[in-house]
Amino acid sequence: MDKIDRELLEKITDLHKIELGAFNIRKNGQAIDRKNTKEIEIVPKKDKSGIDVYIKPNVKNKALHIPVIITMGGLNDLVYNDFYIGENSSVTIVAGCGIHNNTSENSVHNGIHSFHLAKNSYAKYVERHIGMGNGTGGKILNPVTKIYQKENSHLDIETLQIGGVTSSVRKTFARLGENAKLEIQENILTTDEQTATTLFKVNLKGKKSSVEVVSHSVARGKSYQEFKSNLIGENECFGHVECDGILLDNARIVSIPMIDALDNNSSLVHEAAIGKIAGDELIKLMTLGLSQEEAENTIIKGFLMG
């Protein structure tokens, strides 16, 4: 791998922070390296592009890395990855895509990930997206996440779009069983004329199932973001969605909530707040010697990364 490859991998995987176990590295539409362990097996799909990942039962505190890097224009990459987390297991899965495009043609990655969590299992899924390069071609990412959780399972998702992505459409669909728990933390930054759309649809089917979605977004320049959420309570359950956005320049953020309580024991809540950076916060930082731009960047970094 060259310098650009290594830079992209470091930004989207934090390899230096999490112990490297099983992994699958994909570059420009092809798998270039793979490693299995006795606890985690990665099997290439036979009928389409992608992998099936099997985490055995009773595995504890293991890690899996599945990064994708793209360093060419004119590529439209589509991959299907399925993850099967065994009973009583716990695993951290680090994914994400980095695009470095110096051409006038678009670079596109569409990753469709399906999670199948068995009883009493836990998974933390970290997905980072970044666009780099000086070309006029787009750096486009459209992730789809499908979630199927059995009894007492817990999935913790952290997504981060950290800049440079021309456009993204992020879709998440989930079906939760009895006492299943889903937590999602989304952080998105758009600038210039970039666009980002997020759609969450969660069916709370099981008794005492719960979902917590927190979205923090910052829109600068003439960028546009749209956030849509749909919680469907089909049993005694709890669902909470929080959407907080910071607007700068001539950007726009739209939040569209939908909650549907099909059972009178379901409790569903949506909160949204969109506005500019508070003036007193800027003044406080500027009195410490920061310029207005430096103060804004400090606040934004804390908001997205804190």
Image (cartoon, rainbow, N blue to C red):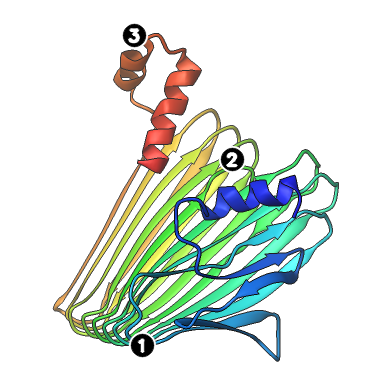
Residue 277 image offset from top left, x and y in percent:
38, 28
Residue of label 2: 223
Q: Nearer the viewer, residue 249 or 87?
A: 87
**C-alpha gap between disc 3 and disc 2:** 30 Å
Instruction: Report the amino acid beneath label 1.
Output: Pro
Residue 110 image offset from top left, x and y in percent:
65, 67
**On screen, residue 97 above or below 268:** above
Residue of label 1: 57
Question: Which residue corresponds to the image point at 46% horizontal and 34% vertical from the top-left?
Answer: 247
Q: Nearer the viewer, residue 92 or 82?
A: 92
* Of labels 1 and 2, the one closer to you: 1
The answer to which image quadrant residue 102 occupies is: top right
Disc 3: CA contacts within 10 A as few (<14), some (14-19) or many (>=20): few
Tell me the quadrant of the picture where the C terminus can be found.
top left
Label 1 sits on a secondary structure element that is loop
First in sequence: mark 3 or mark 2? 2
Question: Which residue corresponds to the image point at 39% horizontal and 29% vertical from the top-left?
Answer: 299
* Of labels 3 and 2, the one closer to you: 3
Residue of label 3: 287
**C-alpha gap between disc 3 and disc 1:** 56 Å
Residue 128 image offset from top left, x and y in percent:
53, 55
Question: Which residue corresponds to the image point at 24% horizontal and 82% vertical from the top-left?
Answer: 152
Question: Which residue corresponds to the image point at 80% horizontal and 42% vertical from the top-left?
Answer: 136
* Of labels 3 and 1, the one closer to you: 1
Disc 1: CA contacts within 10 A as few (<14), some (14-19) or many (>=20): some
Q: On the picture, is 49 further left or further right than 102?
A: left
First in sequence: mark 1 or mark 2? 1
